[in-house]
């Protein structure tokens, strides 16, 4: 397997996160469906979008944070690519709204990406290649979701809201340089949502071994083998995080310690942010990473596939991270909802 | 058909873009192409910082058509740091004590949603300023 790396060295020049203010505790969901003596929820709580928020408004705030850190003229951005499975429109791009609002229009590409939870890292791969080819100096890749969970389904406990934006640019301007990336994709129906359906369906336990673990473990092992690395070479590792168990198990099987996972593991506080999950974990790592440290990020999207990225943090991180709100700043801002208010926020109450 | 009207305003609404008077330096919002202070032509775009404070506020319990989804909601006059007074909704304020003089910052949110067959209109609202520099060991501010 040949590693993916453009001839022109590229990296991340700016990053930004966004998490909405509202939270629903796991115990509130179990109280609703299992009574006061309900089972222990899989995560502590999840983030819920406000009544006036969607993937466009949330992407916009993450993009503005990435631009504050990069401090470049937004008219130089040649692509705005938003990965999500909860775009506000079935037809009409989220990305043009974001591009217009940040001032990247009109000389830019804009498109929405779709690949379950890896739509955002797919956009990142494309942005790295686009800048790497020399066609652009800057490209903005986002992963953002307001994930849908059917009431009473196991996924209702974890389907959260949030995500991240990465401005990709030349290596010499980057706060983290790309050393290589890889993708590992097969046709595996572990989770899906048909057109016009409100909620996704999943194949239960089949989402585990044939879905998540097969793809995540293969992508992580292959990128490390191709670059001649071992787990101890990385200061931080981020896996897609649909719950707290899967990323921890993947880390253990690959030989990573829990200390390497902790900075990028946010699912217990904000839920599974789907296309945003691995990417917002990376923003949280950048908030604490030191120059010279290596970071491995491995996403997973049902359907199914994983993208893995090997990044080296540069000296530029120290000056840039303080220019915008940290991921933790958004996580500690919280207003708890009860189940009824959550049902209103997520439009589970049909008014007509 | 309001599509054209919203489309004309979206540049101003998405990012709080007004104008600056090159004659007397006054910052103008919304854009009106003539300086309200010195009557000189003023057509140079100016993007406001989005920082401001609450000048006055009220809560809407009986919303006009198109805003039912968000009611009850808070409307405010916000004095922008650069001078102009802007009418807008406050957002992310449930459970917050709103006060005159409270520092706020601009965010872009859904202004109205014309049902499942219509368009979504986005624009500026203001929220309480989010505290930055949270230390990593503070896990939860409110419990």
Image (cartoon, rainbow, N blue to C red):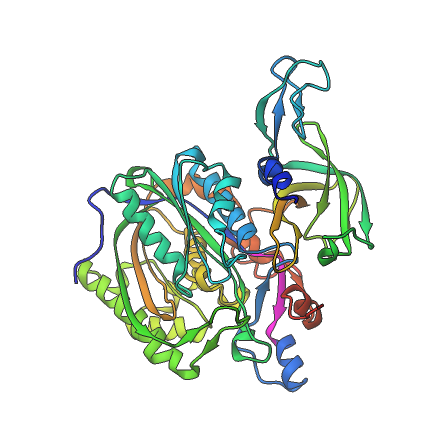
A21 in the magenta segment: yes
Q: Nearer the viewer, residue A33 or B43?
A: B43
Q: Quadrant of the N terminus of chain A?
A: bottom left
Q: Nearer the viewer, residue A217 or A147?
A: A147
Magenta range: A19-26
Q: Quick check: can you spot residue B143?
A: no
Query: Looking at the image, which residue is at 59% across and 74% down?
Result: A26
Query: Looking at the image, which residue is at 40% across and 66% down?
Result: A240
Q: Quick check: can you spot residue A86?
A: yes
Q: Nearer the viewer, residue A110 or A157?
A: A110
Q: Nearer the viewer, residue A245 or A81?
A: A81
Decide: is A279 above or below B89: below
**Residue A217 x, y percent position in the rendering:** 29, 71
Position of A153 compared to A6: left or right? right
Residue A250 lies in quadrant? bottom left
**Residue A204 x, y percent position in the rendering:** 44, 82
């Amino acid at each position: 397997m040949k590693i993916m790396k453009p001839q022109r060295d590229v990296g991340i020049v700016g990053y930004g996160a966004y998490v909405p203010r509202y939270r629903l505790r796991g115990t509130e969901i179990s109280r609703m469906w299992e009574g006061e003596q309900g089972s222990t929820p899989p995560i502590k709580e999840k983030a819920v979008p406000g009544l006036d928020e969607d993937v466009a408004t949330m992407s916009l705030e993450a993009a503005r944070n990435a631009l504050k850190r990069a401090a470049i003229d937004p008219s130089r951005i040649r692509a705005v690519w938003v990965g999500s499975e909860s775009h506000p429109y079935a037809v009409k791009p989220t990305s043009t709204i974001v591009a217009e609002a940040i001032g990247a229009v009109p000389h830019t590409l804009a498109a929405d990406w779709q690949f379950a939870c890896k739509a955002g890292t797919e956009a990142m791969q494309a942005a790295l290649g686009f800048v790497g080819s020399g066609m652009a100096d800057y490209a903005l890749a986002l992963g953002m979701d307001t994930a849908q969970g059917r009431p009473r389904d196991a996924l209702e406990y974890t389907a959260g809201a949030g995500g991240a934006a990465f401005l990709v640019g030349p290596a010499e301007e980057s706060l983290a340089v790309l050393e290589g990336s890889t993708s590992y994709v097969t046709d595996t129906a572990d989770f899906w949502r048909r057109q016009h359906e409100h909620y996704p369906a999943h194949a239960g336990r089949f989402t585990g071994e044939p879905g998540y673990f097969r793809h995540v473990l293969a992508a992580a092992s292959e990128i490390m083998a191709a670059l001649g690395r071992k787990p101890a070479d990385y200061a931080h590792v981020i896996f897609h995080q649909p719950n707290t168990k899967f990323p921890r198990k993947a880390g253990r099987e690959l030989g990573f310690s829990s200390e390497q996972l902790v900075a990028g593991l946010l699912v217990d506080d904000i839920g599974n942010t789907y296309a945003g999950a691995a990417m917002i974990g990376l923003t949280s790592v950048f908030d604490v990473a030191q120059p010279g440290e290596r970071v491995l990020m491995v996403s997973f999207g049902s359907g199914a596939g994983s993208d893995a990225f090997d990044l080296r943090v540069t000296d530029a991180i120290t000056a840039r991270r303080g220019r915008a709100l940290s991921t933790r700043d958004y996580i500690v801002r919280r207003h708890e909802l009860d189940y009824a208010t959550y049902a209103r926020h997520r439009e589970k109450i049909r008014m007509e | 058909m309001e599509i054209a009207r919203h489309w004309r305003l979206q540049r101003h609404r998405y990012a709080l873009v007004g104008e600056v008077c090159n004659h007397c330096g006054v910052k103008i919002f919304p854009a009106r192409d003539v300086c309200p202070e010195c009557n000189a032509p003023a057509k140079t775009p100016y993007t406001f910082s989005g920082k401001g404070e609450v000048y006055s506020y009220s809560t809407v319990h009986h919303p006009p058509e198109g805003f039912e989804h968000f009611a009850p909601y808070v409307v405010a006059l916000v004095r922008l740091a650069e001078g102009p007074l802007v009418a807008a909704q406050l957002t992310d304020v449930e459970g917050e004590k709103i006060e005159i003089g409270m520092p706020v910052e601009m965010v872009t949110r859904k202004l109205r949603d014309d049902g499942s067959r219509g368009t979504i209109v986005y624009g500026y609202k203001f929220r309480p300023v989010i505290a930055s520099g949270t230390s990593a060991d503070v896990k939860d501010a409110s419990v």
